[in-house]
Structures are given as C-alpha cells and as structure tokens.
Amino acid sequence: MANKADVLQGTLTLLVLRTLEALGPLHGYGIARRIEQISRDVLQLNQGTLYPALLRMEQEGWISSRWGTSENNRKARYYSITGAGRRRLARETEDWRRMSSTIERFLGLDPGSLAEEGG
Amino acid sequence: MSWVAVAAARLRALFGRRRLERELDEEVRFHLEMQIEDNLRSGMKRAEARYAALRSFGGVEGMKENYREQRTFGFLETTAQDLRYAVRTLRKSPEYTISAVSVLALAIGANTAMFSVVNTVLLQPLPYRSPERLAMLWTEDPSRNFREGRSALWDVEQWRQQSRSFEGMATFDAMSMFLTGPDGVEQVAGASMSPGLLRLLGISPVLGRGFTTDDAEQRQRVVLISHRFWQARFGGSREALGATLVLNGYPCRIIGILPAGFQVARIDADVWETHSSRQSLRGREAWFVVGRLRQGVTLAQAQEEMSAVARSLRDQLPEDARSRTISVVPLSLYMVGAQSRLGLWMLGGAVFCVFLIAAANVTSLSLARSVARMGETAVRAALGASAGRIVRQLLAEGVLLAAVSGLAGTVLASGGISLIRAYGPGNLPRLEEIALDLRVLGWSLAITVLAGILVGLSPALASLRSDLRPPGAAGGRSVSGGVGIRRVRRALVVADFALAVVLLAGAGLLVRSWWNVNRIDPGFRSDRVLMMEISAPVAFSLPAKQRFYQRVLEAVQATPDVEEAGLIGELFKDNNREELVMYERAGSAVPERMQFAAEEVCGNFFKAVGTPLLRGRPFSSADGPDAPPVAIINETMARRFWPGQDPLGRRFQRGGRDSAGRWYTVVGVVADMRVQGPERTPIPQMFVPLAQSAPPRNVDLFVRTTSEDPQALAATLRSAVRSVEKNASIAKVGTLEQQYEAYLTQRRFQMSLLIGFSIVALLIAAVGIYGLIQYSVATRTQEIGIRMAVGAPAPEIFRMILREGLQLTLAGLVLGLAGAFWMGRASASLLFGVAPTDPWTLSAASLLLIAVGVTACCFPARRAMRIEPTLALRQE
C-alpha cells in the first residue's frame, strides 16, 4: 500500500466498539494502537480525532469510562462497552454488512448483467 | 432519542469545568507518554521520539478545542468566557464603567417610569368588557360652542328607540348623599345609575346582585356600595349584604358590593343608587349617557345615525333646543382627553430623546475605548480569534454594561413611579393603577437590549473595519479605523445637541405657557381664604335651610380672626348648562341661548374672595324675599347683553318667552371670576341674594382670615358651624389657593418633567462634547506642539480647539431647531399664549446650548493652550 488511508469518520464508532467488545476495557492509547494493529497498519488513525469521538460515544451511552492504573503504574482512563453499546455495535455491523454486500454485488457483476439488472 | 442523552450529558459537563480540564490534560499526557515510550523502544532518540509522538497525535490544542466544543454547549462556554472577561475589563476601567452605568441607568429608569404612565393611562384598555365598543353620548350645540352636555332621560329613551347602532344605553351621574351615622351626618360620594349600566359595562358585583328594572321602577330603596367603602365600614365582612344605611334620611338596603376600583367615566362613588330610565316629561338634562355599540357597527356609523336621530327629534323639542346634535365619543377618549393624551405622548417622546442622547453618549465613550484597545484586538486576531469571536466578546461587554444599567434603571423606575403616584397631577385618570407590570418590564428589557447592542456593537463593527495592524506600527494613531470612529463620535455629539435643543425649546415654551397661565387674573384674591362646603341636614325644610345658612354666616362672622365671610352656591364649575336668557334691549325683550351660570350668594361673598365690584352696589339686607328681585352680573354678561352701555337698572329673565320666570334688575357688576380654571374664558354669570331664592342643598363658605395660615382657623370655624346645627355636614375644607391650584397641576407636572429632561439632556451632551474634544486634543498633541514650535500663539491654539467644538455645537443647533419647529407645531395645543415658533424662546434655547457647549470645550482648549511644545514633539 502506498498510502495509509484515513479512517472514515462514521466507521470509527464501529471500530472502537468492536475493539472494546473483543478486547475488553482499554485506555485511549490502547484503543488507537489496537485499531492500527488489527488493521495491519492499513488504517492510520489521526489520534486527535479519537478522543472527541470517544467523548461522543460516552455521551451517547455506548461506552463508559473510569480511571484506573495502567500496566506501567500510571493513571489512565479506561473505556468499556455498555449494553447499549453492544446493541449499537450489532446494528452498525448489520448496516455495514448489508452496505458492503450490496456494493460487492455491484462490483461483482459483469458489464453485461449491469445493463440487464437495470431493466 | 439519543440527542436527549447527549444534551443532558453536555448540560452536566457545564459544571466542574476545572476537573474535566484536568482529566483531559491527564488523558492526553498519558497518551503522549505511552507513544513516546513506544517510539523509544523502537529505537528513536529521546527528542525524536517526542516529536514523532506529537506529530502523530496532531495538533494538541486544536484537538482540545474540538473536545471542549463537543463536551458542552460550545456557545454557552464561550459566552461565559466572554462575560468573565468583560467583567474583568470593566472592573479595570472604573471611570468608564461608572459613568456609563450611571448615565444609562438614569435614562432607562426615566424611560421605564414614563412608559408605565403611558401604558396605564393610554395603552391599557379600560376594565370593562370590550371597552373599545363603549362610547359616551353627549348633547351638543356646536354653533354655541356647547359641548359635552348632559342629557335628559326622555331624550335617551328616544335615542334608544330610534337607533339601531347600540346594543344598549345607560345613564348615570354623581349625587351628593348624606349618611347618618352614630357620630352624626357626613357626606359621602354618591351616584345614581340606570339599572342596565353594570350589564352594559360587563361588570358584576363581587357580592350580591346589581340593580334590576323593578328596583328602579318601584323606587326601591336599595344601594350598591364600593369595594373601598365595604372594606372601610364593614371590614369586608359578608354581613354588609342586607345591612341598612340611612342615606339622605331614608333607610336603604345594601344589595350588592362593587368590584375594587370600579368607576365610570371618572365618577368614583362609594354609594350607588338607581333611577328609572323612563320618564314621561322631558325633565332636566342632567345625565351622563354611555352606550355599547353593536357588533360590527363602527363609531362613524353610529355617529351618523345619531345625528340623524337628533335631526328627527328636533321638531319635538322646544324651540330653544332646536339646534341640538348628538355626539358619540369613545369612552377612552373621554377618560383621557386629546390634550392630556398629547401631553403624555410628548413627555414620552421627550424621555425617549433623553435615552437616545444617553445611549449616543455611552456609545461614543465605548468607541473611544475601542480605539485605545486596538492593539489588544490586533493581538487577539493574530492569535487566531475569528472576527466573530472578537465581535462576540465586545458585544458581551456592551450587553453586560447594559444589563447592569437596566437592573439599576428598573430599581430607579420603581422609585420614580412611587414619586409620580404621590405627586402626579390628581386629575390624571387611573393614577393609582400605575405600576411595574409585565408590559412595562418588557419595555425596560427592550431598551436595555437596544442600549446593549448600540454600546457593544459599534466598537465591534469599528474593530472589524479597522486595519488590525499590530501595535507600534508606524502611524499607529492615524489608523483608518481611528478616523472613522472619530467621525461617528462627532456625529453622535451633533445628534446629542440636536435632541437637547428640541427638549430645551419645548421646556422653554412650556415655561412661557405656565407663566402666561399664572399671570391670568383669576378674578379673586386667593390669599388667606379658607373654604368649606356646608350642607344643611336633608330633613330641613326650605325655610329652615335658609335660616340655617344665615345663622352659619352670622356665627362665622362673629369668630375672631375672620376678616370677611360669605357664601355662594358653588364657585368652581366643571360643566355648564346652556340656558335661554331674555334681556331688555331698546325697550323689547331679546332672547338668547348661551352657556350661563347662576349662583346664590349671601353675606360679603365678593369681599371675602376679593372680587372687585366694578359698578353699582353689593346686596344688602334690604334685598329680602319681598323686595324686588335683584341680581349682580359679571363683566362678560354686561358686555354681552349691553355692550358699551350702563347695565345698572336693566332687566333680564331666565327662560324663554313662555316661561314664568321673574325679571331681575341689575344692581351691580363684578369682575369676571375664572370659575373653570385660568385657561377657559369666563362665561356670563349672575348672582342673586340667597334671601330671594330657593336655598341650595349645600353652599361653599368662604372666609378671609387675618392670619397668614387660613387652615389654622379650620377647627374653630367647624365648631362655629356645628354650634348652629350639630347635624350639619362639612366637607372639602381647604384654602381657595389650593382649589385654584388644582387647575394648574397637570400643566405644572408637564413643565417640571420637561425641564428636568432638558437639563439632563444638556448635561449629558456637555459631557459628551467635553470627552470628544479632550480626546481630540490628546491625539493632536504632536500637531499642536508643532504649531506652537513654529510660532502660533497660545490664544490661537485655544481658538482653534474651541472652533472645533463650536462647529459641532452649531451643527447640532441647526438640526435641533428644525426638529423644534416641527415638534412645536405638533404639540401646539399644549401651549398657552405663546406660538410654537416663538423666536424669543428659540433664541434663548439656542444661546443656552451654545453657552453650555462652549463652556464644556473651554477646559480641553485651555489644556491645549498649556501644551509644552518640546514635550509634545518628543511624544510618540
């Protein structure tokens, strides 16, 4: 890959919720690292946008936060997913899957069928 | 509903800002440290690790701003920040803040107080059902200048039957009533209403019931009492219903209690009785008539119909009443006459002018401040503040200033309102209702906001348009924005002076009118005269009343310290009836219809009130009941009937050819007395001896005392009257001076207020021009230094500065005179004996304005004169 694409604003929620669901409570830095790791460095997070997004999700009630101690004995804020968050994650996953399969179908058709399907 | 959760979270985050900031800081710091550690572990050097961490994070401050904006309502936070900053800057410059707040508070307070008067008296609808459909009906004769005449019941009945514009009509009038109580007889304010009046007005009694037609027809002795009377006499207890009052000697039953503050067309009585609305004979024209227009009928239509009704009735009227018309006037217009309205609007406009002047002044001050702060604004802009943010901050400052002034002003206004209620003209209707209600507070808020916008927005706009160069740049003082601001400030000063001239001219005209009114000879000498209204007991027969009055006079004349004493039926009249009078001329009797007043006098009445007897003789004991009827007439009557001739010995008769009235012989002529106040021309008046006529129900007693304070004699005189008859009723004790003064209160009120407003306006304008010229000298210090260095003498500098101020003053004067012309013409009916474009007044106002303007400029001009050239040149 020549460029590392920016993460789409809308999908950040999806990624964060999925990360928290899968890996349990994490601090902000940890979330950023994991997202970059899991995406195998395809997704480079502008870390500045992460914290406002985390704040937004907390306001919506999808994640909750509390202060704890990190691995190296520093004070850090840990985020965890809530019940509402899990429901949101399920919905967003469903939406994403539906959207991407529609686009897949679109891209998978040969030019001839495109003209046919239109009829 | 997630936006609700988000909004709630944002609201919560408004509190505990400091803690949240700390947490954000910690979180960001943690993130960066972790990133740095990772970078170190992957082999970067210390410094490089830090840079890389910061780079990958993005702009920290920018991210924090985004975060903050997300956290709460960004708008609220920045506004709170702006307000905190505004408080700090205002506290740092106390002279500006204090002078701005005091000027604005005064202006807002005066405006609010004045608006509360206008609101209650002019704007608030009368407390009846659909008051805009209520109208008074008057009997009038425009050809003889007879207006607002009361009507006869028979007429009203005809109007009712022959017109379709009105849902109903009702009649009412004040009556004198005497209440017999345990302590004796006292007079109470009474009135009589036709049974339909309450229903017509849409008013119900708070207790009991109103009158029915049966009550009236069957002449039941039932009364309604006022709320005030109920509280005072019965303590508000329900036992009042059904209680008996002895009125005019007869026991009457209370059947209802009227709501608080009930009055009709200025008749505010404590006891109301009823009368039958039908009458077979025409009877006296003595009743006020109020009607309710039908839905959809306009006033003009009703007036047209009633004029037609009058025309058709004419043939049925006696010959002397033939030219009568009916006039339909909205009740609200009757309550507050056109002239009072104009006066109030004029005062309202004047006080708003003062507000504009004050706002202009404070705006000018704030503009001056903004010039001084241009450097600060430039720095803020360089640091990244958007234009909107800067404007918001300046606006916040203006609004804060205005809010504080508004609060202070409203407090002042409530004080002013109490003053107005205590000392305002007594004949201003609904004076007691004036208060700080919602609409008044709304007005106060509106002008406060207006002031805030003016004071805050103008420097904001100025700062936007100015070149925001950083301070210290070459020619920093002559920045283009600075010049623009100067121009605006000059315009504001000119506007200040223009408005001040208008107010001064108005005040001057009112002062001259007042002077003219005061110079009018009332026809009597009101010093040292005590008056009181004395009523014979109702049960007395006519001869008994006669004897009573005579004996009262004798008792009073025997009292020490009494110089002269006399009685008259009634001195001051409010409404005059028209009468037909026949007089002898060249051997035949000439009838003429005119406004006319006739009174009975007894004793040395004319001497007591100091009315000179111009010709003939006063009444004497020889003018008894068996002697030929004599009369004394006033000058106006003598001139009207027998111009240029000697009226003594001539005869006249009241009533027309068919009347059986007696013929009076004129034995004396007195000077005209202004019995309707100084501003109305006297009407023909005749006086007859009490002994030769039927004694009236009550008389006015006038006593000229030897002491300077007539009131001191009041108690002695009271007991003298009571010694004659202990059941006599005494009311309205006061001096003649006070009674006459009552006609002047409204004019004096208007004049005093306008004088006050114009003085305040002049002061504010003076301060404004002083500030501007002072600033001009300060900015031109270098230039002045140069001038002096190349040889200009100090007086020339003085003249130069003074000229600048004089230019502004004259510009304001010219504009103001134009305004004064227009204003004068618009309010000409408020003036008395002086033209609205009176050159003396306008010249005096102009001179005063120029004097004040020049004086205000003298101080900075003197300072300019004293500038040391060497110091000035060194100054940057």
Image (spheres, helix red, strand yellow):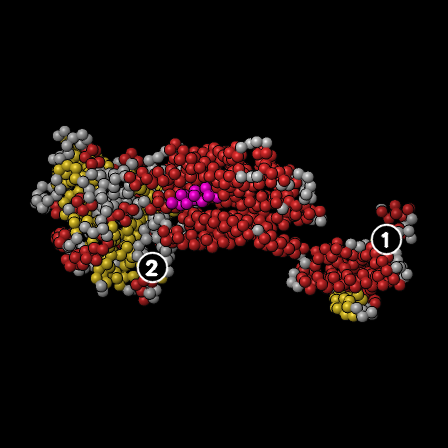
| Image: A30 above or below B419 | below
Task: Work out which quarter of the rendered image holds the C terminus of chain B and state it.
Answer: top right
Could you tell whether B706 is left or right of B810 in the image? left
**Which quarter of the figure has residue A94?**
bottom right
- Chain letter of mark 2 equals B
Q: Secondary structure at mark 2?
A: helix
Q: B197 or B523: nearer the eye?
A: B523
Mark 1 or mark 2: which is in front?
1
Magenta-tinted stretch:
B752-765
Task: Work out which quarter of the rendered image holds the N terminus of chain B and state it.
Answer: bottom right
Residue on which the image places disc 2: B228
Q: Is residue B760 magenta?
A: yes
Q: Position of residue B432 (x, y in %)?
A: 38, 54
Given the image, on which type of amino acid does mark 1 rest? Ala
| Image: B325 above or below A70 | above
State the residue at coordinates (55%, 43%): B364
State the residue at coordinates (24%, 37%): B594
Q: Is residue B312 visible in the rendered structure shown here?
A: no
Could you tell whether B244 is left or right of B567 in the image? right
Q: B351 or A79: nearer the eye?
A: B351
- Chain letter of mark 1 equals A
State the residue at coordinates (34%, 38%): B513
Labels 1 and 2 positioned on one and the same chain: no
Q: Position of residue B245 (x, y in %)?
A: 26, 62
Mark pair 1, 2: CA separation:
86 Å
Q: Is residue A44 magenta?
A: no
Q: Is residue B374 visible in the rendered structure shown here?
A: yes
Q: Secondary structure at mark 1?
A: strand
Numbered circle sitting on residue A92: none
Given the image, on which type of amino acid does mark 2 rest? Arg
Residue on which the image places disc 1: A5
